[in-house]
Image (cartoon, rainbow, N blue to C red):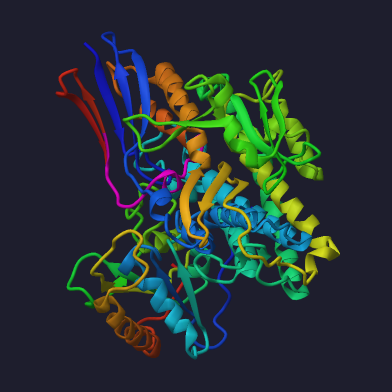
Amino acid sequence: MSRIVTIDPVTRIEGHARITLELGDAGEVRDARFHLTQFRGFEKFCEGRPYREMPALTARTCGICPVSHILASNKACDDLLSVRIPPAAEQLRRLMNLAQITQSHALSFFHLSSPDLLLGWDADPAGRNIFGVMRQHPDLARDGIRLRQIGQTIIETLGGKKIHPTWVVPGGVAEPLDATKRDAILALLPEGLEIAKRTYAFFKTLVPRFTDEARHFGTQPTLFLSLVSAQGHLEHYDGFLRIKDAQGRIVEDRVPPADYARLVGEAAEDWSYMKFPYYKPLGYPGGIYRVGPLARLNNADACGTPYADVALAEFRMLQERGPVTSSFHYHYARLVEIIYALEMMERLLQEPEILSTRVRARARSNRDEGIGVTEAPRGTLMHHYRIDDNGLITWVNLIIATGHNNLAMNQSIRQVAQAYVDGNRLQEGMLNRVEAVIRCYDPCLSCASHAFGQMPLLIELQDAAGRVVDRLARA
Amino acid sequence: MTRSRVPAPVASGPRTLVIGYGSPIRGDDAIGPLAADALAAGPLPPGLRVLSRHVLTAELAEDLAAADRAIFLDAAAQGLPGEVRVCELEPDASAVSTMAHFLDPRELLAWCETLYRHVPQAWLVSAAGDSFAYAGYQLSPAAAAAVPAMLAEVRRIVAAPLPHPAEPV
């Protein structure tokens, strides 16, 4: 008789989701699913709005990563205008994106995943939280806060103190950067880089403890999708789409982002509100791929900044050959990207061009369709709009980083559940590992759908008739 | 190694941090940031800093730890629409969000207590909303009418001497 275990909600992620584990007669895990349980509908209610409102509207998708949506949306609007934005505007947008990546990765590592990594998967859940980390590792917790503050300060210095910056506009940015602001940002970066380096050095000492998790946390063979620069380097704002396979072979390269639909199809399932993107040539669900820091580092030939390139070389040594396939190493990749972001921001700010007053191209809409693609902290972010003759939105497609990873997250929880969960003897630590593999991806379900309200964690073991035979509740 | 960023000594008068938070696209949920923006638009007394946020996030802990007094502006789902309430807040480590990308103000105060050993005296000034519908970009009449009352409460708190000196915990 099959039984179902439900983890509801999954904690320390952004948004509401639940996990169900289907158990066989012997208590073994037969299947696992990651369900996004709430609906949001941005693609629908944006219809009929003027396209120039799209950056502000889509920024509201998320209180955590509005900058990512602002950038992708404005790139789609640039495409509608058919303009090439001034070089300084591109570099300023790039700067803001790197600041966003810094603060988002800091939250994921220091505050959401560190309780598992520092306190242990099997630690008492009452203390396995950020307060447990603060008590045992206060310096690390303060570092995380400071790194977030540095990222946020840079975003506010560039974009103003509005909730969602309106400084990035179709055609460029609204205001140039002045020398005072540039110097203020530059002054923050050495401290940020120092924090990033010492955290990375500390984490490297922890990695050997997690050999078992690294072996079971999402090691499935998948493709990796990301932007890379024209030189094949790590890229977060522009460039070309590249796909590598699990053996490290380049499957697609130098694909203009506007051609994304040739690569990516989207399927839907009746048990989740999140779409299931897949690589079209391999079909659904065989066309499974991953995006985000792990994919970006696997795809890039180099980072292009000194310390990050050293860290990238060490990252590649996590696996004997080929790309790093364990999703556990998203954590490692995030730390490498924080280092890169801080180094690259300093490089951008040292360029005299960054103070250019030519920062905006002005035009009316010159095209009916616009596509904008960037790398958000969690992975490739795609905004695609169609407009009518009056500039009103008639159709929207948003493919969010978390959505790209949907197939992979489902496969990962199945692998972890099969490795750790004994359905005859449910233990919290087993189920925490199932949650933890989801946290590796740092999913943002606000962006993928919806997130409001709170629920207690409830895990139920049900028989095939739906009768509860065991229950585990977390306050 | 100790890298605690201890708040700077008080130079002249208490340092007050006002944080309005809420979603700008869910109708009356925006009353917190809109009230904060209205406060920031006027003349501010020395030592008063105003922030608007969609949600409360981790980095605010350091800002709060550097303040003697904190005032949170938020919408309330309970109460008669437009009703303004003021309550004093204490650190509460149990007020933990399951999602952790946004925080409860009491949790943030507990972060201050645990990490910086300094907690500002804190108040929540809330106004009950009427509508929190998606894609609602304006306040309801009742919520809009509550903004001046919220700001009056903020000014009353700021004008009063601190009930007891802010000491490191």
Q: Nearer the viewer, residue B21 or A133?
A: B21
In this picture, which residue range is highlighted in magenta?
A440-458
Task: Indicate whether A3 appears above or below A254.
Answer: above
Q: Nearer the viewer, residue B93 or B140?
A: B140
Give the percent coordinates (x, y) of residue A61.
45, 54
Q: Front-most of A322 and A256?
A: A256
Q: Which residue is depicted at the point 32% across and 30% down?
A: A270
Q: Position of residue A160 (x, y in %)?
A: 59, 71
For residue B55, side relative to residue A189 (left or right): left
Residue at the image point whose x is 54% and y is 82% from the top: B10
Where residue A273 sits, quadrant-wise, is top left
In terms of secondary structure, what is the magenta stretch mainly?
loop
Which image quarter: residue A172? bottom right
Residue A137 in view of the camera: no
* Image location of residue A341, percent across then percent down: 70, 50
Residue A373 coordinates in the image, percent (x, y): 61, 46
Quarter placement of the C terminus of chain B: bottom left
Q: Could you tell me which residue is drawn at 29 percent across and 85 percent down?
A: B149
